[in-house]
Image (cartoon, rainbow, N blue to C red):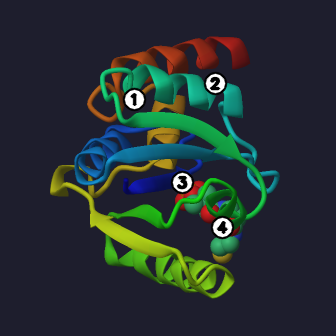
Amino acid sequence: MKTAIYPGSFDPVTNGHLDIIKRAAESFDKLIVAVLYNNKKKPLFNVEERVSLLKEVTKDLPNVSIDSFSGLLVDYTKENDIKIIVKGLRAISDFEAEFQMALVNKKLCPDTETFFMTTKAEYAYLSSSVVKEVHSFGGNIREFVPQCVAEALKHKHTEVS
Ligand code: PNS
């Protein structure tokens, strides 16, 4: 049974993330989407909210489960006996940081392989930061995120303002 992990901040999940999740779920027996508790970044959505949105958008994908983790990714993969890390690549600009992370993870845990998936061209421009920025200035983000995320953003905006 090939289990893979797709780690990230997912603040919030975008259509680009969802595309990678769907395609990875077809390629592996089981996919765990893991949200990082990251003290360094100040997120818009807390981890519980991000996990809940991910659960909602993947509810029709039976081999996908959602979890969260803190600390090193390889500690989570070792504890859960996961050997495959999935990462999405949008552009060459992603490559340097992702390449470095893959090498560090390999060094820390030689058993682990990182699989890079290229994003669909139509999502190459998309990131959680772009979504938050456009939304914060009142722009239309309906084509960027699933419906429940658009609604959560609207509520968040009302909460904050
Ligand atoms: O969506 P993001 O913010 O680009 O995801 C980055 C993430 C969570 C995949 C990465 O920061 C990560 O794996 N963090 C856990 C800490 C870790 O294992 N660092 C070692 C690799 S340098």
- Callout 1 environment at 10 Å: few (<14), some (14 to 19), or many (20+)? few
Q: Residue 7, labelled with which disc?
A: 3
Residue at numbered disc 2: 49
**Which residue is nearer to you in this view: 103 or 83?**
83
Q: Amino acid at mark 4?
A: Val
Tag 2 or tag 1, which sits nearer the N-term?
A: 2
Tag 3 or tag 2, which sits nearer the N-term?
A: 3
Q: CA distance from mark 2 to mark 3?
A: 16 Å
Secondary structure under the numbered disc 1 in the rendered image: loop
Q: CA distance from mark 1 to mark 3?
A: 28 Å
- Callout 3 environment at 10 Å: few (<14), some (14 to 19), or many (20+)? many
Q: CA distance from mark 2 to mark 4?
A: 24 Å
Quadrant in which the C terminus is drawn: top right
Query: At x 31% / y 29%, what residue is drawn?
Result: 61
x, y percent for residue 44: 66, 34
Disc 2 C-beta below 8 A from ligand 1:
no
Secondary structure under the numbered disc 4 in the rendered image: helix
Q: Residue 139, labelled with which disc?
A: 1
Q: Residue 74, labelled with which disc?
A: 4
Taking the view exactly as shown, the residue that stands out farthest to the right is 39
Disc 4 C-beta below 8 A from ligand 1:
yes
